Image (cartoon, coloured by chain):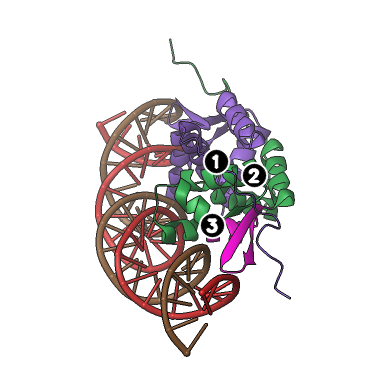
Chain colours: A purple, B green, C brown, D red
Amino acid sequence: MAKRSTQKTCDSTPVKLTADSTADDLAKLAWAIAHPARVQIVRLLIGRQACVCGEIVAQLPLAQSTVSQHLKILKDSGLVQGEVDGPKVCYCINPDRLKQLKASVADL
Amino acid sequence: MAKRSTQKTCDSTPVKLTADSTADDLAKLAWAIAHPARVQIVRLLIGRQACVCGEIVAQLPLAQSTVSQHLKILKDSGLVQGEVDGPKVCYCINPDRLKQLKASVADL
DNA sequence: ATCGTTTATCGTAGATATACGATAAAGGAA
DNA sequence: TTCCTTTATCGTATATCTACGATAAACGAT
């Protein structure tokens, strides 16, 4: 008797992959939170309205320059915004972009 | 008149970062879909019940070995499962893990 | 056993991430 | 001005991703 044959769970109806830009955008947003430190930063910024960079650094076991790099990545994704305030920089979540991330993942 | 001063949006209440493992896990899941090709693979597998590797390769503008690497990353994250079926391998979504991703992002 | 199909792995090359210390830049305070 | 604080950037080292072709491994078919 032969082994359980091919058509168990696989269907073979052809599909075309919508090579849309939404995949790129979701990937970009996912990339922003694809590091534990950045997840923690995002959660921190969601937990409070805004937060000075120095305080974020204080909460993480990373060098200040490393945290600054993570913040730059988060800013590049649009998920986080920074506002200069004297010598300090105040970071906050971009609610629209966060909403977009949640929607994109939810619609998977 | 001095520039708009510090206490505009920043609050200074101390927070402690829950250095929990959920950050690591979310980062891991996010990392899995942090590449456009992997987003498309995940969408493809959600769109149908299961799919043979070769068909995934056919839908992407990437070499077979590259797609295989992406599939490995998706498997490592737990988001995708592969079942050997003769010489072919049938891939499918792990619904529980997908649910976990959605929940983790939604709970942000 | 041999062939053909399918998929994973190897080897490699280039690009990018991650981390740190050191330094620069910007601004408030003296 | 001259400090001091705060944050970004530079330079560097290491590691990992991404991509490909080539090859190996697994299996069905003949």
- Cβ atoms at labels 1 and 2 below 8 Å apart: yes
Query: In the structure shown, which secondary structural element does the residue marked by tag 1 occupy?
Result: loop
Q: Chain of mark 1?
A: A
Q: Which residue is mark 1?
A: A15
- Report whether residue B68 is seen: yes
Q: Which residues are magenta?
A: B71-93
Q: Are marks 1 and 2 on the same chain?
A: no
Q: Is residue B84 magenta?
A: yes
Circle number at residue B53: 3
Residue found at x 51% / y 39%? A16
Amino acid carrying mark 3 in the image: Cys
Q: Residues within 10 Å of mark 3 (few under 14, many from 20)?
A: some
Q: Label 1, label 3: how many angstroms apart (C-alpha)?
A: 13 Å
Residue found at x 48% / y 16%? B4
Residue A75 percent location from the top left of the image: 46, 34
Query: In what quadrant of the picture does the C terminus of chain B appear?
Result: top right
Q: Is residue B89 magenta?
A: yes
Q: Residues within 10 Å of mark 1 (few under 14, many from 20)?
A: few
Q: Is residue A34 above or below residue C9?
A: above
Q: Which residue is mark 2?
A: B48
Amino acid carrying mark 1 in the image: Val
In the picture, measured across the screen, residue A61 lies left or right of residue B108, that is left
Residue found at x 67% / y 57%? A7
Residue D21 percent location from the top left of the image: 30, 64
Query: In the structure shown, which secondary structural element does the residue marked by tag 3 occupy?
Result: helix
Q: Chain of mark 3?
A: B
In the picture, measured across the screen, residue A59 lies left or right of residue A85, that is right
Q: Is residue B94 above or below residue B105?
A: below
| Frontmost residue, A108 versus A10 | A10
Q: Label 1, label 2: how many angstroms apart (C-alpha)?
A: 9 Å
Amino acid carrying mark 2 in the image: Arg
Give the residue at the far top of this rendering: B1
